[in-house]
């Protein structure tokens, strides 16, 4: 009972947040609505007892991806007028995408309904069952190749991004800390002994 | 009297289980939150005394005996000051930003095991929850900087955001080492894995990770020597330039709550949390208080790390911004990756203090 009430409450907030992403005029507000939407989906996953996925969603999307998003959006000087024109211009494309997504979802729900008609909800997990452990076990045994390939692709993306943006400007003064630490007084200061000049 | 208590218990039992759970959880949350806020209040006093004595001053000594009521005087002063909201600021985000930084700082305490058996939410993925919430705290700083509509605040926010994102990775990798050693993501289980006295604590086999974690924690909380986000000499006060009164007090509270939190987490991950350092000393007798696990050991460890925060602040000059970035990306992350590999190989080969971690 409590479960159902909470589900509908969080789902309603998720829905409103998703609408807010589309309709808010200020891009920073839109990003914050998106953050709220991610949070709400994480909470819905928590209700379904998928705590690992829920927390990773917050950790990765809210904690890292959206922060960088916010970074970019804040730096932009966005013309509100033009953005509003975009809403009507891109509406047909968005509608097509939405229709495709709804179609796919209906397919999945229909397939599930065919498979077992009795249990539409999630089965309760047994006592002492750890979602994280189960995921880790399957990820590192059955799907280890796919997992490793994904890791390599991500590494490739990191290296590519760094190489694309790293450029050495000529004449740039850079600090080399190991050189600084390794320096000795002899290289820097020369002590000269000389007699005092007599000024007579 | 006993009859009255019994009838009270029966009345309590007559409530539905959900309601009873909600009432108990709310009371636990209130108790922990109030304790954290009081700790924060006295942490400010502690800081001023510590830094005062390090600089050859007395520190606060006017309000109350030994100046002990100084934090309350400060709070009352901040409460009755006017909150000025800049005209060209984004009102809603300006007001909500301090809340966004205090909520994660307090919410993380839900999974911190304060003593053996007392934790508000004993969840399996506790360590991930801690990581997720500490990374959410950055929104308060960024939004404050942007909503203020001031160059100084924006620069401060950008600096702090880049710094927090950078050091979070090193922190996460350091915690990978901890969870490899403990074999669990539950903070209570991590503490229990370190039972058995000083030599069983993770600080010994994971020494580099301990330093990386604590220094990254200092950087995450924007404390000196990593406090470029509010570098007074360059950008006035950074992201909270325009905040006054209660709004500023909330930022202040969040910063100190985060500091206490990082201290608590370091104590739990590397120093055995509530465990006693003398647990293995059997000559003290079986029922010696020194060997028992208790909340006071955790409190002592937390106090020590808070002291280290102030010690660092009184000792080191502020890092330059590019040096902070270099330290985070080019020094800490490689150290953690190398040490995870070392830990894995050593535990696998059963060498030295790592042998215990293998099971």
Image: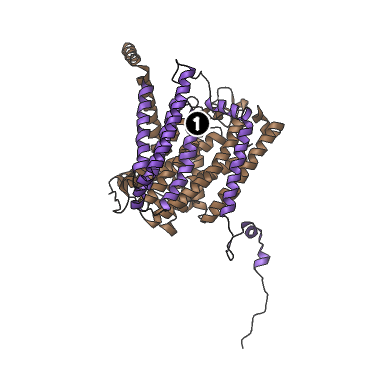
Using the image, determine if residue B157 lies above or below residue A185. above
Camera-side residue of A90 and B110 = A90
Q: Tell me, yes or no, if residue B142 can be seen here.
A: yes
The x, y position of residue B6, in whole percent, is 34, 12
Using the image, determine if residue A116 lies above or below residue B213. above
Identify by letter the chain in purple: A
Q: Is residue B107 left or right of residue A153?
A: left
Quadrant for residue B192, please give it. top right
Letter of the chain that mark 1 sits on in the rendering:
A
The x, y position of residue B100, in whole percent, is 39, 41
Camera-side residue of B158 and B83 = B158
Using the image, determine if residue B134 lies above or below residue A115. below
Q: Tell me, yes or no, if residue B299 can be seen here.
A: no
The x, y position of residue B201, in whole percent, is 60, 33
Using the image, determine if residue A175 lies above or below residue A114. below
| Residue pointed to by mark 1 | A53
């Amino acid at each position: 009972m409590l479960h159902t009430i909470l589900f509908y409450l969080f789902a309603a907030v998720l829905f409103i947040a998703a609408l807010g992403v589309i309709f808010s005029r200020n891009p920073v507000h839109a990003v914050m609505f998106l953050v709220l939407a991610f949070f709400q989906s994480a909470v819905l996953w928590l209700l379904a007892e998928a705590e690992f996925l829920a927390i990773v969603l917050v950790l990765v999307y809210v904690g890292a991806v959206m922060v960088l998003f916010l970074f970019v959006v804040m730096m932009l000087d966005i013309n509100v007028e033009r953005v509003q024109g975009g809403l009507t211009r891109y509406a047909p494309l968005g509608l097509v995408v939405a229709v495709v997504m709804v179609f796919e979802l209906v397919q999945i729900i229909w397939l599930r309904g065919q498979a077992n008609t009795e249990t539409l909800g999630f089965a309760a997990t047994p006592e002492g069952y750890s979602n994280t452990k189960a995921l880790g076990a399957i990820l590192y045994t059955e799907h280890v190749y796919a997992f490793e390939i994904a890791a390599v692709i991500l590494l490739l993306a990191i290296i590519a991004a760094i190489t694309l943006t790293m450029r050495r400007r000529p004449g740039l003064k850079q600090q080399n800390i190991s050189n600084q630490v390794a320096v000795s007084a002899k290289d820097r200061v020369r002590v000269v002994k000389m007699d005092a000049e007599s000024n007579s | 009297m006993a009859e009255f208590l019994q009838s009270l218990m029966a009345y309590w039992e007559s409530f539905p289980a959900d309601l009873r759970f909600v009432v108990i959880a709310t009371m636990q949350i209130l108790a922990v939150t109030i304790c954290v806020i009081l700790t924060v209040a006295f942490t400010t006093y502690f800081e001023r005394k510590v830094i005062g004595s390090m600089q050859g001053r007395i520190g606060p000594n006017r309000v109350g005996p030994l100046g002990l009521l100084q934090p309350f005087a400060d709070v009352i002063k901040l409460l009755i000051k006017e909150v000025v909201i800049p005209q060209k600021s984004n009102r809603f985000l300006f007001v909500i930003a301090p809340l966004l930084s205090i909520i994660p700082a307090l919410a993380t305490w839900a999974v911190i095991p304060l003593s053996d058996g007392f934790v508000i939410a004993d969840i399996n993925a506790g360590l991930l929850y801690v990581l997720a919430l500490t990374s959410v705290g950055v929104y308060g700083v960024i939004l404050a900087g942007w909503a203020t509509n001031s160059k100084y605040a924006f620069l401060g926010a950008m600096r702090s955001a880049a710094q927090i994102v950078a050091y979070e990775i090193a922190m996460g990798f350091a915690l990978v080492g901890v969870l490899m050693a403990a074999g669990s993501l539950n903070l209570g289980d991590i503490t229990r894995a370190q039972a058995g006295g000083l030599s069983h604590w993770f600080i010994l086999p994971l020494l580099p990770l301990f330093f990386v974690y604590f220094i990254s924690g200092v950087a995450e909380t924007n404390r000196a020597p990593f406090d470029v986000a509010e570098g007074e000499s360059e950008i006035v006060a950074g992201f909270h330039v325009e905040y006054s009164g209660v709004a500023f007090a909330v930022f202040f509270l969040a910063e100190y709550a985060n500091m206490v939190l990082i201290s608590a987490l370091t104590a739990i991950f590397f120093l055995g949390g509530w465990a006693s350092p003398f647990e293995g000393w059997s000559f003290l007798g079986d029922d010696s208080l020194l060997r028992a696990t208790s909340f006071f050991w955790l409190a002592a460890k937390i106090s020590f790390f808070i002291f280290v925060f102030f010690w660092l602040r009184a000792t080191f000059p502020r890092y330059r911004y590019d040096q902070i970035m270099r330290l985070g990306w080019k020094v800490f992350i490689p150290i953690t990756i190398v040490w995870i590999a070392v830990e894995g190989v050593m535990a696998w080969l059963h060498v030295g203090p790592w042998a215990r971690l293998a099971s």
